[in-house]
Amino acid sequence: DEKLGCQRLTPQTTVNLLDSVDVFLFDCDGVIWKGDALIDGVADTLDTLRAMGKKLVFVTNNSTKSRRRYAEKFSSLGISVAEDEIFSSSFAAAMYLKVNDFPKEKKVLVSELLLWGLVRGGGSNPTRCIYVIGEEGILEELELAGFTALGGPEDGKKTVHMKPNNFFEHDKNVGAVVVGLDKYINYYKLQYGTLCIRENPGCLFIATNRDAVGHLTNLQEFPGAGCMVAAVCGSTQKEPIVVGKPSTFLMDFLLQKFNIPTCRMCMVGDRLDTDILFGQNSGCRTLLVLSGVTNLSDIQDSSNHIQPDYYTSTLSDVVSLFNN
Ligand code: PLP
Ligand code: CA
């Protein structure tokens, strides 16, 4: 550990950690599951932490599902998690637009949204129109928040016809383009999103996340939302507003919701440039688990500047070291 800026979790540091933390924020893929497979020992570990009175929150950059669908996924894996303990980048996109009172660009405080129950719904203003290069999770969260969502998987079947005099029409009301992982991305969607952003200087360009890869299955990594976002950066020459990890947007939302200081929080994740940075950006304690995409040599690499406070093999160590 000497050349590392972080420590391997030991029985003593685990006791200290559990004493000084009230809220655990968990990244999902690589910590809780890999694709659809639960990581060994996770269910018991979460039960034990709850029994110790810890508050558990789950933060995932995977935008393909809504919070409702993540609650179903947890339940199908035998873990009981409430929808309001889940913060997905799909939900973050919807909340970002709410907080910015899109399309008026008049800021609303997160505390106001929560206090007045404004997280859901919001009338039928036809100008609250958003084009989505992404999947169901984003569509569902935007619609629940009261926005009109266009695009999504449906547009995966459409094509661009480039015949003489053909003109590509897009809805001029679109005031934001949200880009996330889209397994059905095509040239039609790229043209649509690009026109919205380029032709309306006020149109927001929002990325749910920029992960390079994700575990769509437990055996292999697949291209993540980062490549869809990069495609739109390429055609628009603009940079997006990122709402998922490591952006502080979700953390600010969480902090207002739970009203607990970050010094009593620990972010547990498997990625340095999303999870660990997310925790550090807000002053949380950070624990890297090696059950996902990062291994020990990545932390030791001299080109890596993101060091967690602690690292350990897998989440269940938190309980087994404590009992040691
Ligand atoms: N995006 C996609 C499409 C993914 O498949 C994954 C992981 O499977 C992620 C992002 C990262 O998710 P998490 O933040 O839960 O690690
Ligand atoms: Ca992860």
Image (tube, rainbow, N blue to C red):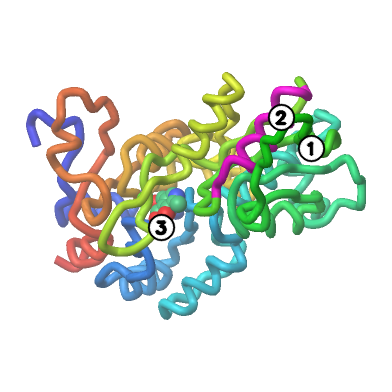
Give the residue at x 64% y 47%: 159
Q: How many marks?
A: 3
Horizontal and vertical percent for residue 97?
73, 40
Q: Identity of the amino acid at label 1?
A: His
Residue stretch in magenta: 185-200
- Pointer 2 or 1: first along the chain: 1
Q: Which residue is mark 2?
A: 195
Horizontal and vertical percent for residue 192?
69, 37
Provide the secondary structure element on which disc 2 rests.
helix
- How would you classify the magenta stretch by its main secondary structure? helix
Label 3 C-beta lies within 8 Å of the nearest ligand 1 atom: yes
Task: Farthest residue to the front: give it.
Answer: 164
- Alpha carbon of mark 3 to alpha carbon of mark 2: how far? 34 Å
Few, some or many C-alpha atoms within 10 Å of disc 2 (few <14, some 14-19, many ≥20)? some
Provide the secondary structure element on which disc 3 rests.
loop
Quadrant including the N terminus: top left
Q: Identity of the amino acid at label 2?
A: Leu
- Pointer 3 or 1: first along the chain: 3
Give the residue at x 56% y 31%: 232
Mark linked to residue 45 = none
Q: Identity of the amino acid at label 3?
A: Cys
Provide the secondary structure element on which disc 1 rests.
loop
Give the residue at x 18% y 62%: 321
319, above or below 252, in the image: below
Label 1 C-beta lies within 8 Å of the nearest ligand 1 atom: no
- Alpha carbon of mark 2 to alpha carbon of mark 1: how far? 7 Å
- Pointer 3 or 2: first along the chain: 3
- Alpha carbon of mark 3 to alpha carbon of mark 1: how far? 36 Å
Task: Farthest residue to the left: give it.
Answer: 2
